[in-house]
Amino acid sequence: MKRYSKTFTVTLTDTLKQQLLQWARQFDEVAWLDSNEHIQRYSTYSAILAVDAFTALKTDTENAFEKLDEYQTITKDWLFGSLSYDLKNDVEDLTSKNIDGPKFPQLYFFQPKKVFLFSKTQVTLSYLNMVDDELQDDWDAILATQVTQKTISKEPIQLQERTSKQRYLQKVDTMLQHINRGDIYEANFCQEFFSTGVTLDPTAAFWKLNELSTPPFATFLKLEQHYILSASPERYLKKEGTHIISQPIKGTAKRAASSEEDAALILQLQQDPKERSENIMITDLVRNDLSRIAKKGTVAVQELCKIYTFEQVHQMISTITCEVCESVHPVEIIKKTYPMGSMTGAPKVSAMKIIETLEDATRGVYSGAVGYFTPNGDFDFNVVIRSILYNADLQYVSFSVGGAITAKSIPEAEYQECLLKAKAMRQVLAQ
């Protein structure tokens, strides 16, 4: 099995992005990952497109990471796909019995026949078992693609709350009782908004969501009838050789209309003791997770509670790194740190158990991860937040939002933060 490559000089404009994704619609498996030109210390590509499965792995939670380990070891190639939050049940002695509306696979990865790797000035096409001049022909076809504007949904989408506001406030009170008893220190509590009988154009919905948010980890993932439309600002885990990077988010503030108000909100977030304590607790949790696979003495906090600004919100982000031995398998690194600490709580297992009893919906792909493995075993995964999930066969559309509950949490304020995080998804689905 051989890959054939060719590089073109290119400027990655919005028009070219739309041509690429419109051309990709013909395939059952599509992964589009876009940094939206966010300049970050750990960025590798401006964008990646991968299409058309040569092989694939789709499984439930039982021995899921073992199967992924075997798949990645055998292929030693590009792999793109998603990890469900409920793979926690493969890592720990846990279960998930709540309502599962979207019904996505717990783990789904594919080895693409065609990969497009974009830098600021070039694109490299990498094809498996190329036929004739297929690579050049495809690139010419992409550039000739006529972009057509699609309607997100022909019918109004009526969103329903899986958890009413009253029940949400009651559940947060229960979470606070657990915290006050010392069962946990912090937990991420989430709620689902959904609609049934929806005929959605996933590509149009993704473009609108990305336009509203322009996040650094934007993702359009099509796996047969399952679509993940993600405007995630959060990196779960990245591997570069033996270097591992995790960047949990905890701490959110709204944007303001004026630069003066915006600066004041940034300062307020930076100095907020509740938001800082949330972030520091999860930073400690991630440090502990990384220590399970790190070389001794290499776990380090590169950034603590740094404020990053996005289109919709300001976020408090910490960056934790470590080094691993070359003998540690890439999938083992993910398994030992899964799920992302920012989406669980502290202590991690206790928090996940309490989350399961209080949330009304199974999280599934939400608060899981989407990303890729490279042929040399490196990887990069986001956290699936600020994302719309769509099952085209079931005509079911869903998004979830949540936040960290600590001893200082005020239930009404937590609910309002959820609505702030839901703003972009609501705007998209209200079109």
Image (cartoon, rainbow, N blue to C red):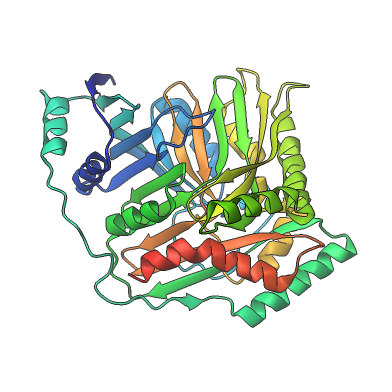
Q: Residue furthest right?
A: 181
Q: Is residue 178 left or right of residue 333?
A: right
| Figure disc tally | 0
| Image x and y of residue 370, in percent | 47, 44
Which sits in the foreground, 229 or 262?
Answer: 262
Rendered location of residue 166, percent (x, y): 65, 82
As drawn, 282 above or below 140:
below
Identify the residue shown where x is 82% and y is 66%.
Answer: 178
Q: Position of residue 192 (x, y in %)?
A: 53, 69
Identify the residue at image location x=65%, y=18%: 325
Residue depicted at x 87% and y 65%: 180
Q: Is residue 425 visible?
A: yes
Q: Quadrant of the N terminus?
A: top left
Quadrant of the snapshot with the C terminus:
bottom left
Quarter-of-image position of residue 390? bottom left
Could you say where residue 206 lies in the image, as x and y percent from the top left?
A: 34, 54
Q: Can residue 343 be seen?
A: no
Give 339 or 168, whichever is nearer the viewer.
Answer: 168
